[in-house]
Image (cartoon, rainbow, N blue to C red):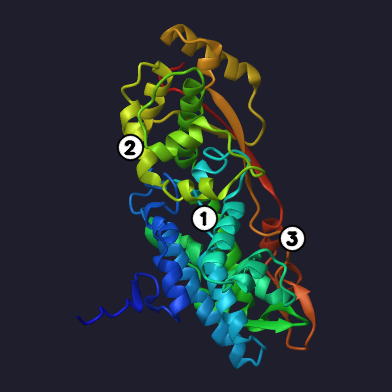
Amino acid sequence: MQKSKKLEIFNDPIYGFINIPNDLIFNLIAEPSFQRLRRISQMGLSYLVYPGAHHTRFHHAIGCMHLMQQAIQVLKIKEVDISPEEETGLLCAILLHDIGHGPFSHAMEHSIVAGVSHEHISLLYMEMLNKKFNGSLTTAIAIFKREHPKKFLNQLVSSQLDVDRLDYLKRDSFYTGVAEGNINSERLLTMLNVVDNHLVLEEKGIYSVEKFLMARRFMYWQVYLHKTGIVAEQLLISVLKRAKELLAKGEILQCSSALLFFMSHKVTKANFSDDDLILFAQLDDVDVLAAIKAWQNSKDVVLSMLCTMIINRKLLHIKIKNKPIDEQRLHKQRTTLMDTLNLTAHEANYFVFSGALENQAYSQENQPIHILKSNGKITDVVQASDQLNLKMLSKKIRKYYMCYPKLSV
């Protein structure tokens, strides 16, 4: 029998055909823990705002790998020393950088496994896969942990101008239809260089990086921090919180065995075992959505209401202010809700709450973007730019929100 030929390319709507460079990458993509990313939405519940935003972490990871291939090619042309081992390490690190995301990506981070970031879980997966592939991911792990002696390798995977951001801004812009986020990632990659072991951007690319930072600001306010998306995300978090609370009291809830395990057991960073990691790989958006659909019929009025709001998109009302929310306003909304639906104060807190939003497109303190000027000098992008608004982008903007049911007055 003739063996079937391996899939060697992906047809991506953003970049066109993407090549799989070697067998190791092919085998990593074929891993069940990576294939699971096909069932993890890139933007959580943002499709409730932007109907096209149904792309997945799988899309994003493959796109990042493609951009990393381009970045490596550009740097090699400019005679930057990157060994074959380091090249493979870069591709593996960026391919697997989000493998630890749970259902609905950032929306449920810390909800299923409290206090454990997706970056930490990604590292655990990489270490497990490194054993399976006989140490082939050792360099990738060093780069992912930002411990590789060649600092620019680390910066390509994680910095303020990394391959991750170059893909997700362009990809999220495409799938949401928000044109302001459409950056010229190819132009930015072409302008990359390395000076004194650090990643820099040549001065010719200054206008592209200005647009990149502006696009990041627009995407956060218009998409990632969209008020409707914030409400949906908070409701999703509340659903898991209420379900855990009911399970702790001995109530029985219908859901997948993997989801039930993480809701019933306190898994922390300290006791996250290999068995837990294997079980976590069975979790995806399907588990949570199926549970929410079933819990609409729960006898618990709070859980039932929360789930019905998400399924039917009958969300809470939200108001965003520049100043912290007055506690008296929250108290009034809670009291009205308690009287209307005969809820306790604790139950009312699931529907009336406040929070804060932060947006900082660029930080001059945290791994700044360095511009290589034509005279050979290195300067921060804010100093190199003639756009005064870049200074404003480096300031952290903080806004406050309150959520409450529309039946309140």
Give residue 253's position: percent from left, percent from top: 38, 25
Furthest toward the left, the residue is 1
Give amino acid for label 2: Ala
Q: CA distance from mark 2 to mark 1?
A: 30 Å
- Name the residue that disc number 2 marks: 290
Badge 3: residue crowd in 10 Å (few <14, some 14–19, many ≥20) = few
Relative to 384, 163 lies left or right = left
Label number found at residue 317 = none
Q: Residue at x 72, y 77 (%)?
A: 150
Q: CA distance from mark 1 to mark 3?
A: 20 Å
Question: Quick one: SS at disc 3?
Answer: loop
Q: Nearer the viewer, residue 315 or 17?
A: 17
Q: Give the vertical position of 79 relative to 52 (above or below).
A: below
Badge 1: residue crowd in 10 Å (few <14, some 14–19, many ≥20) = many
| Quarter of the rendering containing residue 126 | bottom right
Quadrant (top left/top right/bottom left/bottom right) for the N terminus: bottom left
Label number found at residue 366 = 3
